[in-house]
Image (cartoon, rainbow, N blue to C red):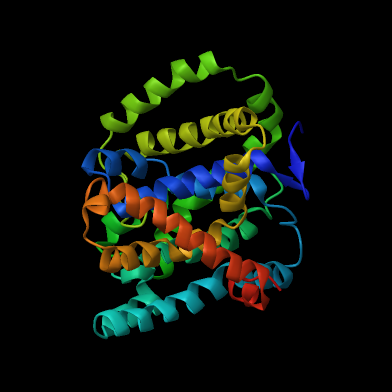
Amino acid sequence: MNANLLNNRIEYIDVFKALGIILMVMGHVWFGKAFDYFIHAFHMPMFFFISGFLTKNIDTPFKDFLIKKSKSLLIPYFVFGILFIFVDLIWNKFDPIRVKNLFWISTNKLGIADALWFLIALFFTNIIYFWINKFKDENIKWIVVIFATLLGCDFKSMLKFALPYAIGPALVGVGLFHVGRCVKKYDSFLTEKVKIWHLLILLPILYYLIFKNGYINMRSELYANRSLFLIIAILSSVLCIPISNYIYKFLNNNFISKWLCEVGRDSIVYVCFNQFAILLLNKYLPQISIFSKMRNIWILIFSFVIMYLINLILTKTKLKILIGRF
């Protein structure tokens, strides 16, 4: 693997995750309907893809695997979900629907905890894939993965309601996760052989496909044309690997590069706290001329400042147990 390593991390993959985080936060700040339409086609699917790309030791005993994923995904989901319910209680009023949704629905009406749906979806993606991976025949494994993915795409429309704990998106995530694991074998090709002119040809095609398809939202289980959705999700995730590598090389390990790697490394903190930071700023950012102009840009910038400070607290102190690091 031809990668820049720091403490055994693949730095361009941290940039990959950081790009996804930035797009997610921009979507939550809101930069218009067209932008929202564009990013939802791929920015959450790419996280399932890269999770598969990075997954190791999936052949460990199930108990060990379950404990590991519970620490890293379920603990933050419930800890910060409960925390944000109390924040809502302080800022607004107690809404029992949010308690029910946190412990059951997991993808709907969670207020400032909305982004946490991804954690529990990724947890079940990992658990489902653990058992699928038991098939030693690769053809059978692909058949089961495809079946699970298509089932996830159609569950809500067939049943007229969403399955609890984001299991519908988790099943869709299984396919993206598996593709990520398969693509891992070709990361050297993607980072060394894919040239900028290849990207200049493929990216307009991808852009066209995104707007050719209907509106996508994994949390709401909206996939429009499911085949086109999967093509877009996989193609965009794969292309983001050489794009991230080019960005990392271009920045040449400067402070922006280091910041992107930090965001990617601690992406879970940014997932959990981005809507809290945005709500805080929407409530208290002064309505003065300097902030009234391009207000969303200021909210985006200050959101990352707030999340950076929260990240320092959570990763540099004993509170890191709240994000499963113990």
Viewport quadrant of the C terminus: bottom right
Q: Is residue 236 visible?
A: yes
Q: Position of residue 214 (x, y in %)?
A: 25, 38
Q: Position of residue 303 (x, y in %)?
A: 41, 58
Q: Is residue 142 visible?
A: no
Write down the quadrant of residue 38 in the picture: top left
Write down the quadrant of residue 319 in the picture: bottom right
Q: Position of residue 213 (x, y in %)?
A: 28, 34
Q: Position of residue 59 (x, y in %)?
A: 75, 57
- Residue at the spot 66% in from the left edge and 32% down from the top edge: 252
Total labels: the figure holds 0
Viewport quadrant of the N terminus: top right
- Residue at the spot 23% in from the left edge and 43% down from the top edge: 32
Q: Is residue 284 above or below residue 215?
A: below
Q: Is residue 122 above or below residue 296?
A: below
- Residue at the spot 66% in from the left edge and 53% down from the top edge: 133
Between 219 and 172, the residue placed more toward the observer is 219
Answer with left or right where residue 318 lies relative to residue 195: right
For the view shown, which residue lies furthest in the front direction? 289
Q: Is residue 83 above or below residue 195?
A: below
